Amino acid sequence: MNSPGITGKISGWARHNPGKIAVKSAERTITYLELENRSNRVAHFMHGRIREIPNVIILLDRSAALIETILGLLKCGLVFVPVDPFLPMNRVKLMIKESRAE
């Protein structure tokens, strides 16, 4: 059985429940429609760079922006490594090196 995956499910929720809250964080709340639109912007931005960038490091704290970015990268089919920005810089550099990310 074919499953639409998380990106397809969020797109469906954005169509059927555009005004419902999708992500709530300390700094903001976004709806499914906003999440869909913002993740599409990330996907469109990255789409032209897929051949240039094999892996992507996401260096964002736990926020709505992190969810938007992850969803956008999933839509492109990119490989990504989420990294906690509060890790020591030498650990972050090692993760970037070992993942061969850009």
Image (cartoon, rainbow, N blue to C red):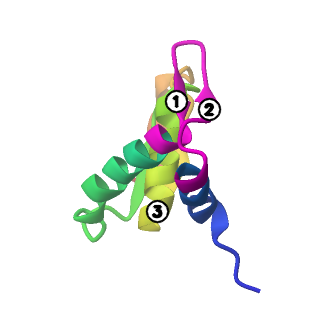
Earlier residue among tags 2 and 3: 2
Q: Is residue 91 magenta?
A: no
Tell me if residue 65 comes above or below residue 28 in the rendering: below
Q: Nearer the viewer, residue 18 or 37?
A: 18
In the drawing, does residue 72 fall left or right of residue 67?
A: left
| Residue 8 % position (x, y) | 58, 65
Tell whether label 2 touches label 1 (CB within 8 Å): yes
Tag 1, which secondary structure?
Answer: strand
In the drawing, does residue 89 fall left or right of residue 44?
A: right
Quadrant of the image occupied by residue 82: top right
How many other residues sit within 10 Å of disc 1, few (<14), some (14-19) or many (≥20)? some
Tag 3, which secondary structure?
Answer: helix
Q: Is residue 17 magenta?
A: yes
The residue at which mark 3 appears reads as 75
The residue at which mark 1 appears reads as 30
Tell me if residue 19 comes above or below residue 7 in the rendering: above
Start and end of the magenta stretch? 15-34
